[in-house]
Image (spheres, coloured by chain):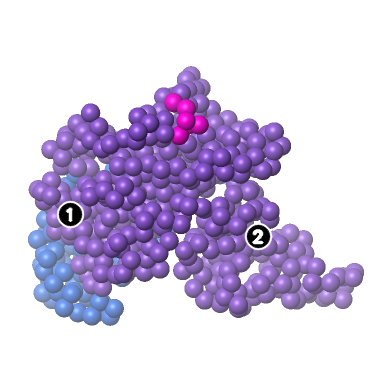
């Protein structure tokens, strides 16, 4: 589902519009820091606009394009630790440890 | 110089003289024979939380719970009379596992009118009664009334469903005691937006409880998570809890809680400022009843800087409350002396809009960043404990809950080995 027309500038990053945490986490691990930084910069700049856009719509009945926008912003949250803190995709000192999200409220 | 007052006894630990102050023997986390004793002495006769009532919302809703530590699998189901019951997940005909899909070891959930065995189509009602036997006339004097599912004690406290494999166990509320009483009335039923994490961890189950029952580690292990100035400040202070309380076999720690919202926004990360959320949860408290005032058991010291309380319900269930109005649970399910399944569920009031949803998302994502560091540290600890190069370790006053946990388990294992079935309850009563 494409993003709302008002957010066509983010179409370049539409691959980050992923509905579930396992998908978002996998994309984070598969991305370079440069890719995440570019996505982060573009998405963060539109975060407030995106929230305002979605919150003008009924929360319990978000249209598909608004949901895609929200999924993209969920990915912004997902890459925020690598970009703002770790400077790497993986959590430092986490070795082979994993933690699967097995129940989540998918929008 | 302590920042927060200690009790008159001089320390939290010495307030409970039965704990002692000596180094603690961690052979209990690597010895296979001890683990076998724990299974009998603790897990097969203690109330175990298996989830919440929201997992079985209507008649016929069920889920299965694998209890490797007790060599069984359970079915938890809501009956037509709305009672929640638990049964061993075992067909009475020839012992086939009754409810499973594809992989017998994986937990499943669903809704049904009855349970039908895959093997020979024996059927059971939601109350466990055997209702249909294929070719019943081929059997010899078979009375269906004698072959219902084998029931397990199942009781509910504040919406939390507990089971106990010991038919002679005392009632759940009595077992949970005073510590649980103090939490009653918390709006658990309003917090139905759930995120559940699961991992298999290469450590003894007690080591992960240890890790989450002290915050002495937090300024050190997690220092990279805060911005530099804040991390340095936290490291300089170290950690002191506001309050500890034991109601053996249960225990709690009450702590200040930092940054929700932070005094100085520049001390937190940009995404936290933008979404008004972080490890401690969304900064804006949900607008529901029951959070102000909180039940008396939460923030028992009524401290202004309070941020979070962890309640350790023996043996493996943690309830953790955050000041901004949400809670989480931890469960530690042993699978071997050096392995366990760790589960954590985060519970929020359902969001009313995208802003609230993203604030919760950030809290859930941040939880994972921390927990991964904690989990990996445990595997490192387990491998070195296994060397037995050193077996006794000094625990400080901020590690009182760890000292208590290992002692409660040891007392029960000792009583079990001495064949004294009720000794553990006497020791609890003495502690109260």
Q: Secondary structure at mark 1?
A: loop
Mark 1, Cα crowd under 10 Å, few <14 / some 14-19 / many 20+, is many
Q: Colour of chain B?
A: purple
Q: Which residues are magenta?
A: B16-21
- Determine the image quadrant of residue B96: bottom right
The structure residue drawn at horizontal position 29% and vertical position 78%, both measured from the top left corner, is: A60
Query: What residue is disc 1 on?
Result: B261
Is residue B118 shown in magenta? no
Name the residue at 42% across, 56% down: B182
Q: CA distance from mark 2 to mark 1?
A: 45 Å
Query: What is the quadrant of residue B123 in the picture?
Result: bottom right
**Front-lying residue, B121 or B76:** B76
Dot 1: chain letter: B
Q: Which residue is mark 2?
A: B152
- What secondary structure is marked by label 2? strand
Relative vertical location of residue B190 with respect to residue B294 in this rendering, above or below: below
Mark toward the start of the polypeptide (2 vs 1): 2
Which residue is farthest front? B8
């Amino acid at each position: 589902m494409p993003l709302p027309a008002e957010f066509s500038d983010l179409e370049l990053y539409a691959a980050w519009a992923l509905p579930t945490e396992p998908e978002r986490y996998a994309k984070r691990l598969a991305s370079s820091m440069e890719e995440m930084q570019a996505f982060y910069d573009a998405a963060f700049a539109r975060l407030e606009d995106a929230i305002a856009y979605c919150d003008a719509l009924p929360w319990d009945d978000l249209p598909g394009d608004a949901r895609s926008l929200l999924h993209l912003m969920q990915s912004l949250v997902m890459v925020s630790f690598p970009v703002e803190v770790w400077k790497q995709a993986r959590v430092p000192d986490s070795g082979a440890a994993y933690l699967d999200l097995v129940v989540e409220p998918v929008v | 110089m302590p920042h927060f007052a200690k009790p008159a006894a001089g320390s939290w630990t010495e307030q409970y003289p039965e704990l002692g102050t000596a180094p603690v023997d961690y052979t209990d986390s690597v010895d296979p024979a001890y683990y076998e004793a724990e299974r009998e002495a603790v897990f097969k006769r203690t109330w175990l939380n298996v989830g919440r009532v929201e997992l079985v919302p209507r008649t016929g809703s069920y889920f299965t719970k694998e209890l490797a530590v007790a060599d069984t699998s359970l079915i938890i189901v809501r009956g037509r009379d709305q009672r929640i019951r638990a049964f061993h997940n075992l067909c009475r005909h020839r012992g086939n596992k009754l409810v499973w899909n594809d992989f017998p070891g994986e937990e499943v959930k669903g809704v049904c009118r009855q349970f039908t065995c895959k093997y020979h189509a024996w059927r059971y009602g939601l109350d466990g009664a055997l209702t249909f036997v294929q070719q019943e006339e081929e059997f010899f004097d078979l009375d269906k009334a004698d072959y219902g599912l084998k029931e397990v004690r199942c009781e509910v406290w504040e919406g939390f469903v507990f089971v106990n494999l010991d038919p002679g166990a005392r009632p759940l509320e009595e077992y949970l005691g005073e510590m649980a009483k103090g939490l009653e009335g918390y709006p658990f039923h309003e917090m139905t937006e759930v995120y559940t994490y699961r991992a298999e961890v290469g450590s003894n189950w007690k080591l992960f409880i240890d890790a989450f029952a002290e915050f002495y580690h937090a300024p050190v292990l997690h220092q990279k998570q805060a911005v530099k100035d804040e991390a340095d400040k936290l490291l300089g202070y170290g950690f002191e809890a506001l309050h500890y309380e034991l109601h053996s076999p249960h225990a709690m720690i009450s702590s200040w809680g930092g940054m929700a919202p932070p005094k100085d926004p520049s001390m937190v990360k940009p995404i936290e400022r933008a979404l008004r959320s972080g490890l401690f949860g969304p900064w804006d408290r949900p607008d529901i009843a029951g959070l102000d005032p909180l039940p008396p058991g939460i923030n028992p010291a009524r401290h202004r800087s309070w941020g979070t309380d962890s309640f350790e319900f023996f043996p493996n269930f943690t309830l953790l409350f955050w000041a901004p109005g949400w809670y989480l649970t931890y469960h530690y399910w042993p699978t071997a002396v050096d392995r366990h399944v760790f589960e954590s569920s985060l519970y929020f009031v359902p969001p009313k809009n995208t802003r609230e949803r993203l604030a919760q998302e950030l809290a859930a994502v941040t939880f994972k960043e921390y927990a991964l560091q904690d989990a990996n540290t445990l595997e490192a600890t387990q491998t070195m404990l296994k060397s037995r190069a050193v077996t006794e370790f000094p625990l400080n006053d901020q590690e009182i809950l760890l000292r208590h946990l290992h002692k409660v388990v040891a007392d029960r294992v000792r009583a079990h080995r001495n064949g004294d079935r009720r000794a553990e309850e006497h020791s609890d009563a003495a502690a109260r």
